[in-house]
Image (cartoon, grey):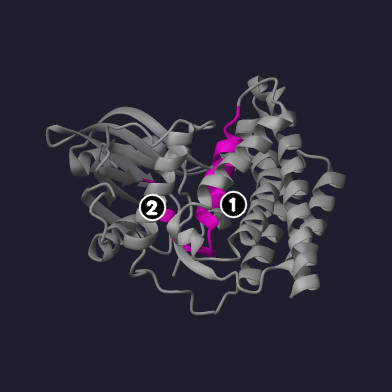
Amino acid sequence: MVNDITGQYHKQGDFSKREQEVLVEVKKLTGFKVDQLIFKGIIYKSDKIGSLIYRGQYKGKTAVLKLQGVPVQVDEYEITKAFNLYNQSKIIRLPEIYLFQPWLEDKGYSFFISEWVDAPRIFTMPWATTEQMQEYAAFFQEYKTNCLANPWLSFPSINITVKDYLLAQASKRKIICQKVGRIPEKLADYIYHTYLEYVNNYLPTDLKMTFCHAHLSANDIYKISDKEYVLMSNLFWGYRPEWYELAINLWACLISIREHNLQPKQSFDCVQDWLKVYKEIPVVQQDSNFERKFWFLMAERAVGAILADLGVNDEFAKPEMKDITPQLLKMFENLFYMAGFEILRNSLKDDIFG
């Protein structure tokens, strides 16, 4: 059982329209005092808000209130309990949850109150120093070997293969992209159909679905000290293609670029620098086919950026993004072509030597 947050796109309305009504109820029930709205969980478009997060005061200490307006398959509270039960890491943890109310069908929301984590991210995106990349790599090694020692969410009862997953995700994004129509239809069709060709003909046979945190980027890793990290976005635990987290981290860096004169070499160097660090991670070194899998996942992330993130997300339609969004679109096009070159090159090498 895993959560499908983006799958709520088509049926989700704007939960923020009920914000005051729900907030009044929850404050009365819990005594939580709101200081500030700090996050809106937007599902691609600003009229599809699924959650709201506030900072405030609860029982004499700074805390966080999250209102969840989209029903999920696995509640965040249940995820936290399971993580705490199976986590073997001494330095990685999740925020402590003080109070939890499961989904109320008649009310149409759930909520929880948790600790306020007052700490910086592991690094500030988009650009990380060599030392910061190495710290992320060390974090990943700890996460992979100790947080994931015992997967605590069951695999979907229907046996979903990597191919099933990738094709379903691409189809969802293409449908969403068509509905919004923000990027050229010709480009969307070309990227989509080329990607389908890669999936159908060149998918690594040893790429498997694994349990992971699907948003393991700097945005979701808070560094309290060298001996304590806190993970956020915990609805995103689930099954994804192997090494998905490493592709997500790089995607998150690239899509957060806000430079008006982005040079193609900058993004190319960023990918190569991260790949070099990734290949030094001990658990990665155990996979002789890692690099081929990595490029396949970077192609998947580029498709996601082009069809759904840049093509649909309202963030990139803002006036201040007028000059930056086309540059990002071109950057992810180039990343897709670069990944495609590596996919084909590695496949040809296999044909010759395999």
| Left or right of residue 91, residue 214 in this image | right
Answer yes or no: is residue 68 visible: no
Residue located beneath label 1 in the image: 9
- Where does residue 209 sit, x and y in percent of width and height? 53, 69
Q: The C terminus is located in which quarter?
A: bottom right
Foreground mark, 2 or 1, reads: 2
Q: Position of residue 28 (x, y in %)?
A: 21, 39
Disc 2 secondary structure class: helix
The span picked out in magenta is 232-257
Q: Is residue 256 magenta?
A: yes
Q: Residues within 10 Å of mark 1 (few under 14, many from 20)?
A: some
Task: Name which residue type carries label 1.
Answer: Tyr
Q: Which mark is residue 101?
A: none
Quadrant position of residue 151: bottom left
What amino acid type should be assigned to the residue bearing mark 2?
Answer: Asn
Toward the viewer: 230 or 115?
230
Tell which of 118 and 287 is nearer to you: 287
Can you say whether 4 is above or below 115 in the image?
below
**Label 2, label 1: how many angstroms apart (C-alpha)?**
19 Å
Taking the spot 34% from the left edge, 67% from the top edge, the residue there is 149
Position of the N terminus, as image quadrant, is bottom left
Crowdedness of circle 2 by 10 Å Cα count: few (<14), some, many (20+)? many
Residue sticking out furthest to the front: 353
Left or right, 111 with respect to 320, comes to: left
Q: Is 72 contained in the magenta span?
A: no
Compare marks 2 and 1 and give the one earlier in the sequence.
Answer: 1
